[in-house]
Structures are given as C-alpha cells and as structure tokens.
Image: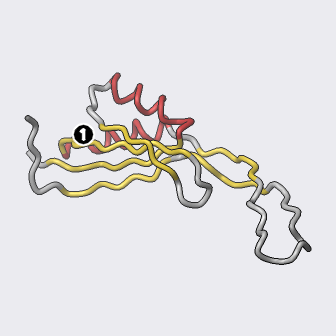
Amino acid sequence: MATKLIIAIVQDKDANRVSDAFVDQNVRATKLSTTGGFLQAGNTTFMIGIEEERIDEVLQLIKDASHTRDEFMTPPVNLDGGMEGTTSYPVKVQVGGATVFVLPVDQFMHF
C-alpha cells in the first residue's frame, strides 16, 4: 500500500475547522504553528501521512474547511527614507485558503 505525505498550510482562522474535519473522518495529522512570510500572519501547518487511495478525500476536507477572504492590512512604515510618504494606508489583500503539497514517501513506519 503506497503512502503519501500531505503538507497543508492553513490560515489560523481555518485551522480548527480543518482539524475538526480530520477528527471526524479519522485522519491523523501532526499540527504545527507556523508563520507566513508575506504578511507575517499566523498559520497552521498540518503534516498527514495517508494511504494513496485517501488523498482525494483529505484534499476535499482541506478545501471545504479553508476559505479565502479579503482583509485590510497596513503596510509597515519605511523609516530608512525621508519623512515624505511615510503615511501608510490600509490595502486589501486576499488571505486564507490553503497551500497543499503532496509528496511521495519512501518509507512509513508507525511505532
């Protein structure tokens, strides 16, 4: 039976829904607190070792529980330059959803 590793990076606001869906469907996952690069926002990364025939099921659970949304953020003020243009205004950015990687696994052992 082939095993795959799914790495799913989910915004913290969606993490509980994803986690609950995994519990309901008996999907074992390791949950890590991570930080995104662009917005420095909190994320949760799930690592799931799963049989190949359940990959589509797990991907659908993640898709159903993770939603994109628009939020406003204020970019940091650049103090290196002069004082002109230091006022920063909120900009709309899309956040949420999930970034998912499915990787082959050479060996899988559960002790």
Query: For the point 57% across and 46% down, which residue is it?
Result: 96
In the rendered image, which quarter contains the N terminus? top left
Query: For the point 85% across and 58% down, which residue is it?
Result: 89
Of residues 73 and 58, which is closer to you in this image?
73
Residue 28, how many percent across, how many down? Answer: 26, 32
Query: For the point 50% across and 50% down, which residue is it?
Result: 35
* Residue type for callout 1: Arg
In the rendered image, which quarter contains the C terminus? top left
Q: Is residue 7 above or below residue 38?
A: above
Of residues 39 and 95, which is closer to you in this image?
39
| Outermost top residue | 24
SS for callout 1: helix
| Outermost bottom residue | 81
The answer to whether residue 29 is left or right of residue 36 is left
Exactly how many numbered labels are in the figure? Answer: 1
Of residues 34 and 97, which is closer to you in this image?
34
The answer to whether residue 80 is left or right of residue 105 is right
Q: Which residue is mark 1?
A: 54
Picture quarter containing residue 29? top left
Q: Is residue 94 above or below residue 30?
A: below
Residue 2, how many percent across, how many down? Answer: 12, 49
